[in-house]
Amino acid sequence: MTQNAPRKVALVANCLLNQNAKVCEGARYPGLVSPVVEALRSRGYELLQLPCPELSFAGVRRWWAVYEQYDTPAYRSHCRRLAQAIAPLIERHLRRGDEVILIGLDGSPSSGVRFTSSKPDWGGRPNRPEDDWEIVPGRGIWIEELEAELTRRGLPSVPATGWALDMGRFDEPGSRRDLEQFLDSRGQSARPRDEDSGAQ
Amino acid sequence: MSRDARGWRIALVPDVLVNPPAHIRALLPEVLGVLESSGYGMLQLPPPGEHRLLLAVIADQLAEYSHHGYAVIAIGMRQEQGYGLHWRRLAPLLRHRGAELPRRHIVDSNVDAALEARRLAAQLAIYDLPQSEQLRWRV
């Protein structure tokens, strides 16, 4: 491949390369989520790690939270700052015609792509012993703000999917199949870039 | 935190070692593979250039980790300017946040890649915070 040939670039949610970013009890791997890394690299994707908005906003010892709790002007402003920090790198790839995809974290209030977590009445004393949040279709706050920043720059939408780590019961083989189907469908079709980028 | 699998150790890695160009790939250790087998997470640094805001964002994350019991090491590449670590900008950002500068481990593409991989793995295996700090945070 020549230096100027189009490249394949995967924007990867921070915690898929660093499980230390997860909320307490949320880490399923010591560090890298190796099935994601293997699936991407074996198909020739370069990795571009996104910042973790929750870690730099609420810290490593933050409480669990749902979409509605993070849906505040201050958190969205924080996410926009992070988006402005990483967008120039993404823009450079898109402007030069590289194939860019996004791998988020389904079920996450911030990094969800196809699904996020919801419980409108969560708040106050953190006394929820049961996992009683709901998984609902839609983006997390961070992904919403990142996509909005790319749109502001006049860039095309980026095909996206999510690794289903935060969906309650984690199913690694199912998540792996799901990701591989998404990646292989990219290679087999010549669909417009935004066809599969909407929340499902 | 019995259900939690985090390794509490993180490597700061330049883009060139995450995504090595084809013409030097065979000369470099497979850093992500070494990190995976060593149980390290990764924070990726951008390629050479001006990345003021992104480096500030990365410094925020590094400071948060270093203040809460996580061991952070920086893996540089000898043949890159500043080892690919953006140290001249990152170091003052970390000092400003009251965070210690991570120890640096430098890999060299002029040395046998397999040897460099073993040297890196050996460094990662022994690197961690003092036990008193581990006990303080990792409950």
Image (cartoon, rainbow, N blue to C red):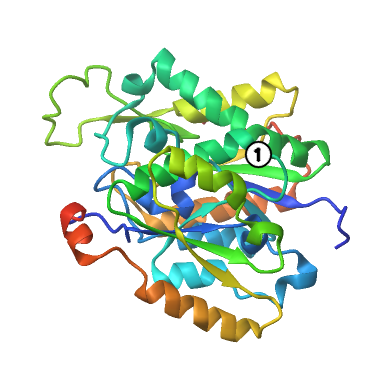
Q: Quadrant of residue A56?
A: top left
Say few, some or many: other residues with alpha carbon within 10 Å of mark 1 (under 14 / 14 to 19 / 20 or more). Answer: some
Label 1 residue SS: loop
Q: What residue sits 45% from the left and 43% below the top?
A: B95
Residue A187: horizontal and vertical position, in percent?
Answer: 72, 53
Residue at (35%, 75%) from the top-left corner?
Answer: B126
Note whether A33 is above or below B65 in the view shown: below
Give the camera-side residue of A163 and B125.
B125
Give x and y (percent) for residue A64.
26, 34
Figure quadrant of the N terminus of chain A: bottom right
The image quadrant of residue A122 is top left
- Which residue in the structure is indicated by mark 1? B51
**Amino acid bearing label 1:** His
Q: Who's the residue at 66% across and 69% down the image?
A: B78
Q: Is residue A199 rendered to the left or right of residue A22?
A: right
Residue A101's x, y, as percent?
Answer: 65, 43
